[in-house]
């Protein structure tokens, strides 16, 4: 969602900050941060061969940046729609000129596509022409779906039928796809085709199961949840499952939190009763006055087995509770599984989970429930360029019963409060995090943070009113590639790029000095690595600068380090999300999310992308291919 965060919760955290010795650190960082920013530019440009003539490893001619009603891709490439909102998943389904009913929507491709996983078929293969397209459907845009509604009043105006349609249009869509002479096509009637919605039964697993704060009238044992919500980022496990991230349910609930026993917790997670999609008017479980624990059953990472259409998705509570973004899985050299995660809100944190047990690739079943036991930790970026992973573990440091954390389940339910107490580094809206398969380095994307003031700067977030975002590079010890130790307690870190227009010195952007007027970007959001170790950046927020959101590729090492090139631009109002490569790197799937959403109401839309007929724009997954069928970017 453009300007995604649903929560605003500075009060408690600010109080904690004032009480802690960290205040002195933050104040000190205000001046240090400015110096550090300059230092980072120096280290970026002076290091690794920057004195030599710089050359990008990317072989394509950069796209000229135009903000248009249609998408555009660089010369020598094609971009085609694979699946769009409302596409029926079975041959019995119909194509919709308008808005489907909830029942129809529940068997059709969902709205506002986001994170994409391509899961090869047959299972376990590295096939790049046949697989399952597993796609998050983050939210709906009522202002460009229903006539006469704005973003602000839709929650009060939607009928029950419209609300129920919305609940069926979010979640996740799985379709089988094949690459043929006509490009990628969905296989209708595939047994794999499946929708997950707010009605799909899901199991809570891990430490939080049965905690009093997840018990409801419908689920007195606190173990089965109906549905998933705001599915934004994600990840893929080595055992062939998909992780989908619930990114902050705070504005999807109604009712007052005044007088509720868990009021402070609900506040810290931003629940304000705003009922943005009108659910509480028709469904008691979304009214916090009637069902005060239902909110605690969201904001988890959910594991889905796309190869088993009847399987029950699992909400893995050991991974913590936050506005989850990214759940990038790394198989560490000792067999333990590491998951990198961001909490996408102003001044929230970067997290890591390390499994207790090892995964055995020879026995894929060893991955089952591996994510239920392990150590969650949160990042503190130190001024000296080191990074500490602080364990979010009951009984350690301030996370004790006396301080309000009764058990590990309690710690996980209150992950944000635990991270506050530990003194983690508040970041500029952490979104995606990915690991470079070649170097083993980890990249965490900060989309932007207009709320950061001069007195809240810290070494990893160096610009006040950061409207442009930046990318932080985290370096595990141990060596390159698979030698990197993603379980180490201490890493080092650096700033990879500071986004924004480098020709405006006031912005203090830092890219490679040869970055073109089309190549710099703002608001980096989702990222992906190609098999050659190049970083692909999707942006969310360029429209605020009268620029299109799009896809940029950038080397992370060598002479082209920090030199982005523009490959693709979205149509008006849309952001680019979910970049995902096939294993051989010859197809890049992109979610084009919320086209035309910048219009106040449906009658004012500036584009009817991608069909350019009828009355509705349609969020869609597209496939980018090189004309010669070669690797993208080569
Ligand atoms: Fe849904 Fe953080 O973007
Ligand atoms: Ca975003
Ligand atoms: Ca996003
Ligand atoms: Ca990603």
Image (spheres, helix red, strand yellow):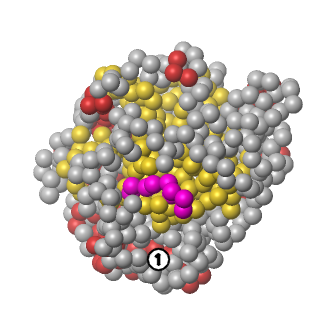
Instruction: List the single residue furthest toward the front.
Output: 181
Reading the image, the residue beneath label 1 is 145
Nearer to me, 168 or 425 = 168
Q: Picture coordinates of residue 53 (x, y %)?
A: 87, 31
Residue drawn at (35%, 25%) of the image: 361
Residue drawn at (70%, 29%) of the image: 557
Direction from residue 82 to residue 241 in the image, left or right: left
Q: Quadrant of residue 36?
A: top right
**Secondary structure under the numbered disc 1 in the rendered image:** loop
Direction from residue 202 to residue 506 in the image, left or right: right
Instruction: List the single residue furthest toward the top.
Output: 478
Quick check: is 544 in the magenta stretch? no
Q: Picture coordinates of residue 59 (x, y %)?
A: 75, 42
Residue 361 in view here: yes
Residue drawn at (60%, 81%) of the image: 604
Residue 377 in view here: no
Quick check: is 180 in the magenta stretch? yes
Nearer to me, 601 or 538 = 538
Quadrant position of the C terminus in the picture: top right
Q: Picture coordinates of residue 441 (x, y %)?
A: 58, 27
Q: Give the main secondary structure, helix, strand or loop, of the magenta stretch.
A: strand
Q: Picture coordinates of residue 314 (x, y %)?
A: 27, 44
Residue drawn at (35%, 41%) of the image: 123
- State whether residue 198 is above or below residue 127: below
**Which stretch did the figure color magenta?**
175-184
Near mark 1 (Cα within 10 A), the count class, few <14, some 14-19 or many ≥20, is many
Q: Quadrant of residue 470?
A: top right
Q: Is mark 1 within 8 Å of ligand 1?
A: no
Number of marks in the rendered image = 1
């Amino acid at each position: 969602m453009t300007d995604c965060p649903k929560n605003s919760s500075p009060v408690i955290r600010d109080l904690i900050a004032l009480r802690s010795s960290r205040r002195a650190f933050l104040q000190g960082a205000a001046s240090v941060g400015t110096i550090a920013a300059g230092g980072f530019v120096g280290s970026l440009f002076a290091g690794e061969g920057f004195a030599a003539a710089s050359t990008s490893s990317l072989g394509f001619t950069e796209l000229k940046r135009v903000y248009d009603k249609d998408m555009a891709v660089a010369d020598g490439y094609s971009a085609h729609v694979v699946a769009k909102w409302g596409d029926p998943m079975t041959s019995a389904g119909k194509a919709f000129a308008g808005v489907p009913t909830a029942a129809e929507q529940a068997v059709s491709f969902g709205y506002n596509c986001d994170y994409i996983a391509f899961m090869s078929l047959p299972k376990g293969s590295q096939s790049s022409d046949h697989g399952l397209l597993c796609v998050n459907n983050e939210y709906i845009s009522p202002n460009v779906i229903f006539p006469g509604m704005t973003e602000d009043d839709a929650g009060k105006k939607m009928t029950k039928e419209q609300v129920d349609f919305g609940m069926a249009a979010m979640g996740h869509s799985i379709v089988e796809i094949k690459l043929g002479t006509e490009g990628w096509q969905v296989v209708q009637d595939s047994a794999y085709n499946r929708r997950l919605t707010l009605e799909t039964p899901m199991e809570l697993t891990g430490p939080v199961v049965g905690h009093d704060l997840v018990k409801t009238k419908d689920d007195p044992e606190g173990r089965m949840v109906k549905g998933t919500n705001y599915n934004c980022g994600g990840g893929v496990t080595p055992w062939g499952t998909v992780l989908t991230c619930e990114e902050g349910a705070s504005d999807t609930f109604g009712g007052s939190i005044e007088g509720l026993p868990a009021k402070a917790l609900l506040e810290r997670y931003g629940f304000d009763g705003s009922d943005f999609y009108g659910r509480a008017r028709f469904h008691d479980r979304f009214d916090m006055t009637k069902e005060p624990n239902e909110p605690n059953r969201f904001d988890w990472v959910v594991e889905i087995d796309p190869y088993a259409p009847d399987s029950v998705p699992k909400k893995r509570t050991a991974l913590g509770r936050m506005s989850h973004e990214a759940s990038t899985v790394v198989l560490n050299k000792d067999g333990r599984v590491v998951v990198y995660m961001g909490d996408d809100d102003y001044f929230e944190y970067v997290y890591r989970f390390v499994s207790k047990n090892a995964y055995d690739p020879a026995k894929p079943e060893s991955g089952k429930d591996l994510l239920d036991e392990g150590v969650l930790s949160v990042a503190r970026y130190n001024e000296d360029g080191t990074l500490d992973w602080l364990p979010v573990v009951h009984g350690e440091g301030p996370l004790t019963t006396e301080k309000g954390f009764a058990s590990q389940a309690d710690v996980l339910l209150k992950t944000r409060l635990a991270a506050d107490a530990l003194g983690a580094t508040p970041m500029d809206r952490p979104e995606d995090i990915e690991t470079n398969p070649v170097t083993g380095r980890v990249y965490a994307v900060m989309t932007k943070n207009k709320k950061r003031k001069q007195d809240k700067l810290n070494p990893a977030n160096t610009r006040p009113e950061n409207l442009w975002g930046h990318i932080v590079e985290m370096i595990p010890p141990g060596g390159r590639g698979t030698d990197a130790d993603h379980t180490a307690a201490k890493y080092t870190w650096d700033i990879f790029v500071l986004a924004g227009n480098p020709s405006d010195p006031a912005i203090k952007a830092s890219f490679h000095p040869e970055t073109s007027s089309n190549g710099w970007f703002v608001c980096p959001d989702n990222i992906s690595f190609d098999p050659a170790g190049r970083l692909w950046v999707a942006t969310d927020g360029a429209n605020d600068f009268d620029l299109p959101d799009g896809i940029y590729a950038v080397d992370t090492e060598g002479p082209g380090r920090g030199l982005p090139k523009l490959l693709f631009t979205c149509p008006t109002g849309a952001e680019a999300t979910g970049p995902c490569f096939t294993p051989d790197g010859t197809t890049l799937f992109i979610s084009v999310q919320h086209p035309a959403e910048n219009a106040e109401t449906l009658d004012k839309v500036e584009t009817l992308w991608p069909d350019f007929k009828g009355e509705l724009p349609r969020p869609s997954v597209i496939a980018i291919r090189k004309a010669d069928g070669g690797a993208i970017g080569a």
